[in-house]
Image (spheres, helix red, strand yellow):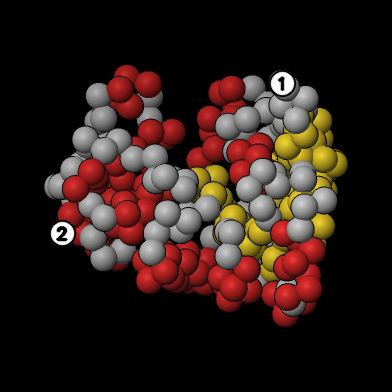
């Protein structure tokens, strides 16, 4: 279970890439357990860098990150592997192994709980297989479990990505542009699923989006980044057209 404090705490987080490009500049914020936070910004504003620093897919240049009271920055690889179980990641391009079945892709969310040998041969206990099948069924794709991931539509593939993330039993879901490659109807289906998980299972959600209207509709709180800096943090009601124009204006 999460600690009584913030789910996520960011202190003075910065990331500068090897070519000198700033990805994040002195970012500080806290996210409470159970929040649904949407993050807006132009391409290159730092949204993906932010999420990838949180789960340590990329290394911050400076600053500290705490998840449910535990520091993520500076910990050993072994401890990071355990801590990452709490962080579910949903990707823009789904990141599925397209030639594997839907069930196998879903079960890969359990790899962090097993030995390297068991993970290598994809050996999973019957209980985990049954849990994966239930997850897929609840997401409306239980009948696709035996099909290869490449045979599914984009919206169906993203549901597999969500099922995989949920198999980690995460405390927080980080969704990096999860609907940008989907048609509007499929996008709403995916965001409805994330909102239901947030409300019914209490999982904190941080979701990068391009569309201000979707950020307002689904986020209980909206953040906006511009050239690596936090330029807006507030309720969706404050995200008026003038504010959106400022967020998307070139600095």
Residue 232 at what x, y percent from top left? 79, 62
Q: Quadrant of the N terminus?
A: bottom right
| 70 is higher (above) or lower (below) than 2 | above
Percent position of residue 93, x then y: 42, 45
Which residue is found at the position 39% from the left and 59% from the top? 182
Q: Quadrant of residue 207?
A: bottom right
Residue that mark 2 sits on: 143
> Of 153 and 112, which appears nearest the observer?
153
Between residue 221 and residue 185, name the one nearer to us: 185
Percent coordinates x, y for residue 165 in the rendering: 43, 48
Disc 2 from disc 1: Cα separation = 46 Å
Q: Position of residue 243 (x, y in %)?
A: 78, 70
Check the image and report above or below for 62 versus 10. above
Residue at the spot x=82%, y=57% of the render? 231
Q: 21 above or below 166? A: above
Tell me the mark number nearer the camera, choosing from 2 and 1. Answer: 1
Res. 87 mark: none
| Residue on which disc 1 sits | 18
Q: Is residue 95 visible?
A: yes
């Amino acid at each position: 279970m999460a600690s009584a404090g913030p789910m996520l705490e960011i202190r003075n987080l910065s990331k500068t890439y090897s070519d000198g490009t700033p990805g994040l500049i002195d970012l500080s914020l806290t996210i409470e357990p159970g929040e649904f936070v949407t993050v807006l910004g132009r391409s290159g504003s730092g949204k993906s860098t932010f999420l990838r620093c949180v789960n340590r897919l990329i290394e911050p240049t400076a600053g500290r990150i705490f998840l449910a009271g535990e520091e993520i920055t500076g910990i050993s690889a072994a401890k990071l592997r355990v801590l990452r179980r709490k962080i579910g990641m949903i990707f823009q391009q789904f990141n599925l192994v397209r030639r594997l079945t839907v069930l196998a892709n879903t079960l890969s969310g359990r790899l962090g709980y097993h030995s390297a040998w068991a993970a290598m041969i994809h050996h999973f206990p019957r209980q985990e297989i049954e849990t994966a099948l239930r997850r897929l069924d609840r997401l409306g794709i239980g009948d696709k479990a035996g099909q290869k991931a490449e045979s599914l539509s984009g919206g169906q593939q993203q549901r597999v990505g969500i099922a995989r993330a949920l198999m980690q039993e995460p405390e927080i879901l980080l969704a990096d542009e999860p609907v940008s490659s989907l048609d509007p109807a499929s996008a709403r289906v995916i965001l409805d699923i994330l909102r239901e998980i947030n409300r019914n299972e209490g999982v904190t959600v941080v979701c990068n989006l391009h569309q201000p209207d979707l950020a307002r509709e689904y986020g209980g709180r909206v953040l906006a980044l511009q050239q690596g800096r936090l330029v807006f943090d507030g309720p969706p009601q404050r995200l008026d057209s003038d504010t959106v124009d400022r967020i998307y204006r070139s600095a």
